[in-house]
Image: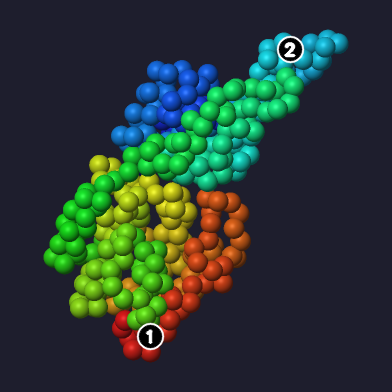
Amino acid sequence: MRQDTLDSPIISLQARQLLGLICRKGGADCPLLLPEDAKRISAQLRSDPTVTLQLLSSAEGLSHYTEFGEKGCSTEATCSAHDRKRDLDVLQRLGLVPGDTRRARYLIELLFERIPTPDGICAFATEKWQGCPLARSGAYESVKKEGWQAVVYARSEEEMALYRKRNVEAIETSPRLYIRPHHLMCFCCWFAGGEGQGLRPNDTLSEIFQRIRQEPDVPVVLVEGSCMACECCDGFHPETGRCVHPGGLIRDFKKDLDCFQRLGLLPGAVLPAQELLSLLFERIPSTRLICAYGDGIVRSQEWAICSSPEGNPGYEKTRAVFLRDGKI
């Protein structure tokens, strides 16, 4: 098993320092992060999309008031109240708690979506809470306007096109197809019983299914994690094979394992494509069972539901065609 996982953070920051990283990138001399630290972290994020960031806060580390006599708190605690509030403001807006770890792209996209400005977090109009004047400098906003690609590694269009070409050649000639099981469902949703046509822009599922339709008995190896369909995706990292897309994350691993369980198979299972589709449609009649976790409840951003909580009608249309004709 690889070690560059979400439970092995590469960079740990106080939550407020995430704002400082962006402000520094925008040209502000932010006091929340030393310039050499900001430069080092920025270089890591720009070069490696698999970097994991852990957000911390000391808010829970306060001593009990009885330790400080009549005053009830330490001078140090009074002085650091601003920073503790900044940490918790950032975490609350992101829907996270101290110690949470996410890949860099996920965090930066979420940050720009939910925190449009550091004003109101790093600075206030309230006496004793004026905070940092740089919060209104526009430095953070200037980077946010450029988007996550200004902060985190992003694949070029040329590279993705090259990988698509190479990937399509492999799909057409490989004696076996390597597919993660929930991607079979993704294509069925898009295909919608024949309504979906043409190439998909961010994967090669269309090319895989063209091969399956032409060669129904082609062996399919079910894999856990990135598969043949992933290599031209903007969230695929060629050097590691990791999915760093914010929408991929951990929920897609659960989808794969839920598929394996319902199919009664394990990673590495090999079946002829037609037999696999027959088993898929027999055991999984609706995407609600996999992509909506069986109950349709969204418990957090990380566990968002794909399509409708009641199931994707496109999948059901493809399933109906297969049950009627014995093929798609």
* Residue 126, x across and y down, in percent: 73, 26
The image shows residue 199, relative to residue 325, as above or below, that is above
Badge 2 element: loop
Instruction: Name the outermost residue toward the right.
Output: 70
Instruction: Name the outermost residue toward the front.
Output: 137
Residue in view at x 45 percent, y 67 percent? 262
Type of colouring: rainbow
- Identify the image quadrant of residue 214: bottom left
10 Å neighbourhood of mark 2: few (<14), some, or many (≥20)? some
Q: Is residue 89 left or right of residue 49?
A: right
Q: Which residue is mark 1?
A: 321
The image shows residue 123, relative to residue 194, as above or below, that is above
Tell which tag, 2 or 1, sits nearer the viewer: 2
* Type of amino acid under label 2: Ser
Quadrant of the frame with the C terminus:
bottom left
Residue in view at x 41 percent, y 41 percent? 146
- Identify the image quadrant of residue 52: top left
10 Å neighbourhood of mark 1: few (<14), some, or many (≥20)? some
* Type of amino acid under label 1: Val
Residue in view at x 34 percent, y 81 percent? 194
* Residue 212, x across and y down, in percent: 24, 74
User: 51 or 126: which is nearer to us?
Assistant: 126
